[in-house]
C-alpha cells in the first residue's frame, strides 16, 4: 500500500530546503536501495532519505512494521532516515 502525498506539502518542503541551501544533490521520489522504497526526498551522496508519512496510513500496524524494516535495511547500508509524520489537509 502506498501513501499519496499532497503535492502542496512536498513543494513547500522542497522550497524550504532550498532556501536553507539543502537542495544541492537532492532527488525527489527516487527509487533507492531496496524493497522498491521511494523516499520523498533523498541525497545519494550523503545517504540521507526523507519520508513524509501521512498519519492515516503510517499509523497502521502493518505499515509501521514495513517502515521499520525499510528503516533498518537503509541504516544497515549506511543511510540516515528521517520520517516526518503529517496530517494531510
Image (spheres, rainbow, N blue to C red):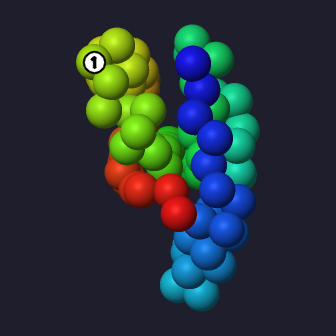
Q: Residue at x 53, y 63 (%)?
A: 89
Please, is residue 43 above or below residue 63 in the view? Answer: below
Residue drawn at (37%, 43%) of the image: 55
Rendered location of residue 50, percent (x, y): 48, 48
Identify the image quadrant of the N terminus: top right
Give residue 53's quadrant in the image: top left
Quarter of the rendering containing residue 75: top left
**Vertical placement of 52 versus 64: above or below?**
below
Residue 16 in picture, x, y percent from top left: 56, 80
Image coordinates of residue 69 in percent, x first then y, are 35, 15
Element under disc 1: helix
Badge 1: residue crowd in 10 Å (few <14, some 14–19, many ≥20): few
Q: Residue at x 59, y 87 (%)?
A: 19
Left or right of residue 48, residue 84 in this image: left
Q: In this view, does 38 lie above or below 34?
A: below
Is residue 45 in sight in this rendering? no
Name the residue carrying label 1: 61
Residue drawn at the location 44% of the way across and 32% of the way down: 57
Amino acid at each position: 500500500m502506498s501513501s499519496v502525498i499532497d503535492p502542496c506539502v512536498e513543494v513547500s518542503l522542497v522550497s524550504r530546503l532550498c532556501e536553507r541551501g539543502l537542495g544541492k544533490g537532492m532527488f525527489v521520489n527516487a527509487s533507492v536501495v531496496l524493497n522498491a522504497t521511494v523516499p520523498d526526498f533523498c541525497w545519494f551522496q550523503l545517504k540521507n532519505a526523507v519520508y513524509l508519512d501521512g498519519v492515516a496510513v503510517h499509523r497502521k500496524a502493518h505499515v509501521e512494521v514495513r517502515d521499520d524494516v525499510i528503516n533498518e535495511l537503509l541504516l544497515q547500508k549506511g543511510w540516515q532516515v528521517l520520517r516526518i509524520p503529517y496530517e494531510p489537509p
